[in-house]
Amino acid sequence: MGLPFLDSFSAAAGRGVWHADELGLADAQVAATGHAALDAQLPGGGWPVGAMTELLQGAPEAHVWRLLLPALAQAVQARGGPVVLVGAPYEPCGPSLAAQGLPVEALMWVRSEAPAARLWACEQALRCADIAAVVAWLPQARVGELRRLQLAAAQHEVLLFVCRPESAALSASPARLRIRAGRCESDASQIELHILKRRGPPLAAPVMLPARNERMAALLAAARLRRKLRLQQSGTVPAGETAASSATVVRIDAWKGGGPDALDRLAVVA
Amino acid sequence: MHWIALQWLPDADTPDVPALPTPESLGWWALQYTPHVAWQDEALMLEVSACERLWGGRLQLMRQLVASNPAPDVRMLGAQGATSLIALARLRLFERDENRPQDIPAGLPLDTLSAAREHLDLLARLGCRTWGDVAALPRGGLTRRFGTGLREALDAAWGLRPESHAWLTLPDVFEQKLELPALAETAPELMWSANRLLSALQIWLRARQRGARALELQWTLDLKRFNGVNLPPHQQVTVRTAEPTQDMAHLRRLLSEKLALTTLAAPASWLRLRTLETDPWAGASTSFLPEDNRKGDRLHEMVERLSVRLGAQQVVVPAAQADHRPERKQAWRPALQKENAPAKARKDEKAAASQPDAIYPPWLLPEPLLLEMDGERPCYRGPLSRLIGPQRVEAGWWGDKEDGGQPAMRDYYVAESPEAGLVWIFRERPSARFSSGEVRWYLQGFYA
């Protein structure tokens, strides 16, 4: 027998109550990730703004740009400030990032090796009003220190991504969203994303994302096709096999020199 | 016009009389409240008719003045009046604990008027006790007998003549010295005294309507020789900021970061703060839109703070460069440095450097890594299979060592490593001149 008081209460509070078996709603702003498959699995449909997102990976450089670049490019466009990279493992290549939408001037690189200096620089960057996002590599950070960063991000409503090694997956973390990214074992052109922590039910199957951007995928397909054709001409492979099923490749023989880039001369992909 | 007269009375009875701040610093203190400040006889006069609204009215202003007394141990007397002479006369009455007369200024006793002091005996014999008595005497006779000074002072007191004052002004360059309360052994100990100088600087900046861009903090060393080494008389640190500022919190943080990295050659006794560069203060423009009013520091403040602590070379931003060698397509320069190339040249460089179609890897190695060979195939965490390429780069033949050393003749490939994913490798093409016969492969970037 249901009490009428409780019924009216639950109806009124229904909006504010989150059932643990459904995906949580974002209580703050989110930034779209640029990958529809990932957006569908994140609470609110994007990276949380003003909260820490943790990326756990085997190698510090792996998959970072593939995952974050669309959101970072959008944040730079919207807020206009630089993206601060604290302790990036290698030198970020400006022209490559610019070709994918993140302008060269919107990068700021804090080259610091000491863990304490990285944490301090991270916090200072979060406290600045004019920056678009912070991406930090903090392999040795402790929970208390991460908690401090999380609070600073919440206070100043900045996108904060922290990259940590895979071994940190088992330890506790104040991050609102934790994702372990790895290469798919069966298909090298896919990234497997295990969402370790989110406001919502645990995810049974990992989210798959293409590991290469469209241009790279098309070039790889074109190169594969060319190799096949060459082999066909020499007669080792029987004709009739469809070489590339994912992309339609049109050969262009019209060019005769003068192109800016040798790689461009291969093919155009429709 | 409304005047406030202030006077500091050190108690004669107390044995250890605290030293009164210099008249100059008292004047600077008063300049925070009004731009019209002058010393008249023994009192500091403030003309506040134009600015009393800003401080919330006369009463509120007086309360603030008393509350922020620059010499807290010394009693400060204050009196107000419609003209400076009335305010001064009331201050003198207050000092003698006399009641103020009913009608002001006519009822004020004569000895409170500075111009009448030398004629007091004669005026008393004439039967004049108050300002009103003297003012009632015929003008011509009064001027002939006592000179023009007395009559002019009375006219000024009644507001019939404009008053003229030697207003206090601030120097063009801020420079103040301060003796440390005790010898400072380490640089951070200087910070407490530097704070006092900084608050004086803030008064100076506000009064002159300027913002500070560069400051120099100098300290005098107390020893001429130390450990057998001759010491210079002074040491100093310089603090610079990109935008002119009146915000002492930012300058204080920069200064303390600098001082934390400094070691004193010998104990310091005196401190001197000096402005090197100041700019006219434009004020801050604010917006009503909520998205424009994000709380937090400004970008240049963050960059300066990071650069001061970590070193300018550690906080870098990229600049596009027109070159075909990938490692030279961008130059990293300290974020602290202003970009000094003109806008057009920068645009040209950017246009030349941007190749939206080229597929560069997002990560570059600082130095190309020489790869091990497995027969004909290069290896990086497993044998590499070449997928795309070659992309041929021939550049750098024009330069000398600074411009990139030897010419770069390379064939770039995108290759796949079984463990590391897609990588960017190149084969150094042996040129005819430097041919050593051996083909070398290098790794230059990661696609990730």
Image (cartoon, rainbow, N blue to C red):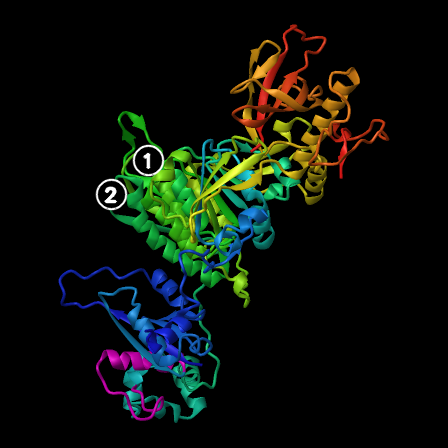
- Residue A177: say if magenta: no
Count up the numbered dots.
2
Left or right of residue A237, residue B168 in this image: left
Residue tagged by mark 1?
B263
Badge 2, how many Cα within 10 Å: few under 14, some, many 20+? some
Chain name for mark 1? B
Residue B240 visible at all: no
| Region of the chain picked out in magenta, as a range | B83-109
Is the C-beta separation of discs 2 and 1 under 8 Å? no
Picture layout, residue A206 above or below residue B108: above
Which residue is the extreme one toward the top?
Answer: B437
Give x and y (percent) for residue A157.
47, 55
Nearer to us of marks 2 and 1 is 1
Q: Amino acid at mark 2?
A: Leu
x 29%, y 33%: residue: B224
The residue at 32%/60% (across/down) is: B22
Q: Residues within 10 Å of mark 1 (few under 14, many from 20)?
A: few
Q: Which mark is residue B183?
A: 2
